[in-house]
Image: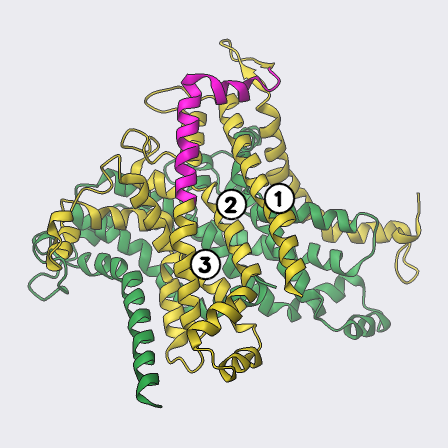
């Protein structure tokens, strides 16, 4: 089986070359395969099985997926979580990323003082655990402590105070905005880096042509950072459809009130482990995890084959 | 600088300052109020602690709960172990992929890259069964293994990029001097990788330290909780005791802030060099 490409280097025997490769590659590849790829494949595989009353599993084809999408015991919560997750994602795309781009634009202005200080401080919440952030905002918004009420009254809007996390109509939006507040540093840093990579001559040329700084940003720089915006979007998508910690920390596994803040991650956790309302179910848990996998895969594919390709076509 | 430029510079600073305040205010509010007595927390939440309102009663309760020390030790063990093995195994694999030609080289590189985009969390159902079969439930070993598996893809990716920047002459010279491949890696390449290793270490450290999901699934037992899980449970238990809740939050925030101030330069340099290209 010895082939040219497998031949060792500098007269090393084939056996010792393979030993060398094994030594360097085996630890990483084995740990990664066993604790990351295998569980992923096995989970997808077990979504094809159905748990019987006696605890055994029988092959069920795509039956679990049909149940999840059409049987009202499951489909109502599934579509609810799916809808909420899209709202969660759209709020990140519509609020977090534009703010991140705006902050990056300001930070990349030439001759800005205290640039490093602003960058470091604005990025700070991103460093903290989602659990800590969740509880902190829970306290701030709590009617018991009354800080948010006090602040609203100070600007004459006391009448607008409401238990934002406790109302069905506002819980999801509030939780999404807290997540936006925490993670705005990521688009900011990634876009900022892309903006720094643009040659100064381009901006200078635009200034000579009489464009204002604002116009230079919109018509010269922004089109050039579209690849970074594409990357930020796919990262946002993957993270949002995989989110769990914040909702669990703030609203618990039941994602209340009345499942109004339920997203795929919390639905998966509840289904797999069970809770006050239902028993844990590994088959349906795997099915939901597989759906999440497919959604994330779809997002990554769209990015790789549609967005990135188009960017490459237009960039030169 | 003319008046117009001054005015626009002022506006830029006003916006950045306002956003910085928005980013920091909740954190400052928690730390500030954690040092006050209950009456002052509710009566004047926006005031700094004064000699008459200063109180450490919340911290007494947090540290009186002897478990908090074990949360920290567990988190340090898990994060430290994860960083060590991720760097060691990740750099070894990156070296082999960058340096040696073999039939499955490209396949392995793509195989490892899957893990950058697909969250390992989605395999939790089978993972928990696997960990149970290995008798590793409620052990820190389980967490370290899972986190190493989770972080190796990005580590290999970043380290491979750096590996390419090391001049080829250096390796060839070492080979001519008769050094074994193992010695070349451990004594010549690894020391040169230090800046890249630091970047990967910071990238690995933060998500592992902050993670709630895997500690909740794999090691929730008393005495095995990490700080994030421990604090989450503590907060759930003492939710009505505001002194304790604020102190527990501050206890979790302050060490991360200190580490962040120390490593922020490294981290932001890493983010700005490796992430977009």
Label 3 neighbour load within 10 Å: few <14, some 14-19, many 20+: some
Please say which color scheme the image uses.
Answer: by chain
Note the chain letter of the yellow one: A
Give how far across and how far down residue A260 sits, in percent.
32, 33
Give how far across and how far down residue A12 sits, in percent.
90, 58
Q: In the picture shown, does residue B259 fall above or below A157? A: below
Q: Which mark is residue A301?
A: 1
**In percent of the image, x 72 and y 47: which residue is there?**
A26
Image: magenta residue range: A60-89
**Are both tags, 2 and 3, on one chain?**
yes
Q: Quadrant of the C terminus of chain A?
A: bottom right
| Residue on which disc 3 sits | A186
Which is nearer the eye, B64 or B173? B173
Note the chain letter of the green one: B
Which is nearer the eye, A164 or B40? A164
Whether residue B13 appears in this view of the structure is yes
| Residue on which disc 2 sits | A238
**In percent of the image, x 37 and y 52: which residue is there?**
A180
């Amino acid at each position: 089986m010895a082939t040219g490409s497998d031949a060792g280097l500098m007269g090393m025997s084939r056996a010792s070359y393979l030993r060398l490769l094994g030594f360097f590659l085996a630890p990483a590849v084995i740990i990664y395969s066993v604790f990351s790829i295998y569980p992923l494949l096995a989970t997808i595989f077990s979504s094809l099985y159905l748990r019987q009353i006696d605890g055994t599993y029988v092959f069920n084809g795509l039956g679990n997926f049909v149940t999840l999408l059409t049987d009202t015991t499951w489909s109502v919560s599934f579509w609810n979580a799916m809808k909420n997750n899209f709202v969660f994602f759209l709020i990140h795309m519509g609020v977090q990323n534009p703010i991140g781009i705006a902050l990056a634009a300001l930070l990349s202005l030439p001759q800005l003082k205290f640039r490093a200080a602003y960058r470091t401080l604005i990025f700070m919440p991103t460093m903290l655990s989602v659990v800590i952030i969740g509880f902190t905002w829970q306290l701030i918004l709590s009617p018991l402590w009354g800080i948010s009420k006090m602040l609203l009254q100070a600007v004459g809007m006391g009448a607008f105070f409401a238990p934002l996390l406790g109302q069905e109509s506002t819980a999801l939006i509030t939780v999404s905005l807290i997540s936006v507040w925490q993670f705005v540093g990521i688009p900011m840093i990634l876009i900022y880096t892309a903006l720094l990579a643009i040659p100064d001559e381009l901006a200078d040329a635009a200034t000579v042509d009489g464009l204002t700084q604002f116009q230079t940003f919109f018509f010269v720089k922004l089109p050039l950072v579209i690849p970074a915006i594409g990357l930020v979007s796919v990262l946002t998508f993957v993270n949002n459809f995989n989110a769990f910690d914040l909702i669990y920390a703030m609203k618990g596994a039941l994602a209340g009130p009345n499942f109004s803040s339920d997203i795929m991650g919390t639905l998966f956790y509840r289904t797999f482990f069970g809770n006050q309302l239902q028993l844990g179910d590994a088959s349906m848990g795997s099915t939901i995890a597989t759906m999440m996998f497919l959604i994330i895969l779809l997002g990554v594919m769209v990015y790789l084959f549609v967005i990135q390709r188009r960017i490459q076509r237009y960039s030169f | 600088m003319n008046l117009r430029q001054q005015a626009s510079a002022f506006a830029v600073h006003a916006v950045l300052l306002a956003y910085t305040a928005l980013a920091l205010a909740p954190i400052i509010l928690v730390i500030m109020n954690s040092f006050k007595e209950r009456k002052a927390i509710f009566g004047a939440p926006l005031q700094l602690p004064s000699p008459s309102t200063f109180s450490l009663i919340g911290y007494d309760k947090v540290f009186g709960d002897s478990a908090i020390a074990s949360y920290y030790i567990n988190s340090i063990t898990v994060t430290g172990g994860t960083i060590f093995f991720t760097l060691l195994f990740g750099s070894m694999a990156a070296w082999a992929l960058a340096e040696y030609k073999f039939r499955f080289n490209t396949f392995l590189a793509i195989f490892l890259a899957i893990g950058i985009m697909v969250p390992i969390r989605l395999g939790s159902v089978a993972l928990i069964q696997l960990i149970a079969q290995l008798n590793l439930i409620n052990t820190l070993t389980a967490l370290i293994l899972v986190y190493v598996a989770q972080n190796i893809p990005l580590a290999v990716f970043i380290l491979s990029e750096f590996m390419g920047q090391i001049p080829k002459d250096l390796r060839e010279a070492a080979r001519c001097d008769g050094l074994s491949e193992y010695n070349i890696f451990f004594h010549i390449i690894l020391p040169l990788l230090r800046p890249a290793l630091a970047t990967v270490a910071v990238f690995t450290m933060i998500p592992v330290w902050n993670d709630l999901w895997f500690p909740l699934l794999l090691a929730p037992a008393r005495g095995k909780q990490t700080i994030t899980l421990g604090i989450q449970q503590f907060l759930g238990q003492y939710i009505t005791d505001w002194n304790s809740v604020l102190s527990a939050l501050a206890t979790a925030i302050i060490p991360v802030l200190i580490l962040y101030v120390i490593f922020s330069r490294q981290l932001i340099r890493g983010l700005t060099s490796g992430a977009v290209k």
